[in-house]
Amino acid sequence: MPNGWWALLLAAPLLAQTPVKTGMPFSDFYLHDPFILAHKATQTYYLYCGAGARQLGGQRSGVVTYKSKDMLHWDGPYKVFEVPDGLWADPAQGVWAPEVHFYRGKYYLMATLHNSNKLLPYADEEKLPIYNGKKAKPHLRGTQIFVADSPEGPFAPLGNSPAPPAELMTLDGTLYVEGGVPYMVYAHEWIQVLDGTMEAVPLKKDLTAQAGAPFLLFKASEAPWVSEQAKKAEKPQNFVTDGPCLYKTKKGKLVMLWSSYRDGLYVETLAYSTSGKLRGPWKQGEVLVGNDSGHGMLFESFEGKLMMVLHQPFRQARGKLFEMEDTGESVRVVKQIVQ
């Protein structure tokens, strides 16, 4: 692909805003898989979420951001990214779980893209899982990395492939740096592996490519409340892993927020690395927030408070904001800020 092919796209009116409203509470707008970047230089909170082609008024899906000074009143949506032509993904098929990380002087967007027209190999059609009443065939899905000089974009692609291996059906990639080595931690889709997993892959320091083989962190079925479901089920079950978020406590304990399903409803739960390192081994904790809530992430407010944002319910989702406590051994909910 010729160098600078994306520059032609960026020269187009990519950042033309869709209708913007001001002073909105969370309850006024839908959002799924929320991610908040606290931008200290401007004392602005950026809330990112995926946007479909219809919302963006065109043929491409993308990412929007909402901006706030106090986390209670939000302005937006502002379009910061559209899926360009020329990638492996279909621009019309949506963007999941966008995250923006500040790393080595740049802002990196990690966005899960899709191409259901390009199937991945599978062994036995009779063993394919059922999703939305149909047999679900594994297809191209993965987290692509994009880069910009500003949290408002424009974001240009780093290469033309997902960060995890393209033959894996993956989603919800997040950035974690350990010992100076950047990793993408991601969920391996249950559609491909049935028992969804959390995995990680080391990246080159400029995030342009993998720097080693991916490795397993844990399986969804290892959670004690998931295992109980499996014992009660009459038929073999599929288990979901979603939305990893890693956090080091003030005592150096490594915890992961992640999401799955309990009794048919989405939950936010915790896992702990017993070694304090990414490679684990990992021990599963109990559910942190239930009631069809999930895909949470942690960030620090400008006042130094640990916060968590997640969506609830799973469908027609709204944002929910919580004040958290770092106990040293784990994290816990102090109170809900936004109902």
Image: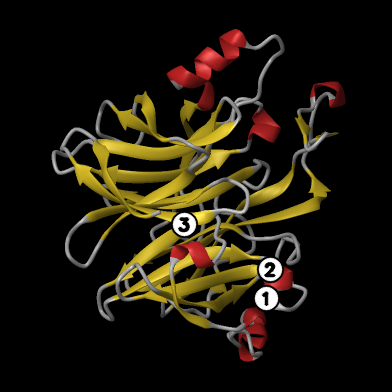
Mark 1 or mark 2, earlier in chain: 1
Mark 3 Cα-neighbour bin, 10 Å: few <14, some 14–19, many ≥20: many
The residue that appears at 48% across and 46% down in the rendered structure is 295
Whole-percent x, y for residue 24 in the image? 45, 73
Mark 1 or mark 3, earlier in chain: 1
The label number, if any, that marks residue 56 in the structure image: 1
Residue labelled with disc 3 = 319
Left or right of residue 125, residue 309 in this image: left
Badge 2 amino acid: Ser
Badge 1 amino acid: Leu
The residue that appears at 55% across and 55% down in the rendered structure is 32
Work out whether 46 lies above or below 236: below
> Viewer-nearest of labels 2 and 3?
3
The label number, if any, that marks residue 61 in the structure image: 2
Mark 1 Cα-neighbour bin, 10 Å: few <14, some 14–19, many ≥20: many
Q: Which quadrant holds the N terminus?
A: bottom right
Whole-percent x, y for residue 283 in the image? 35, 23
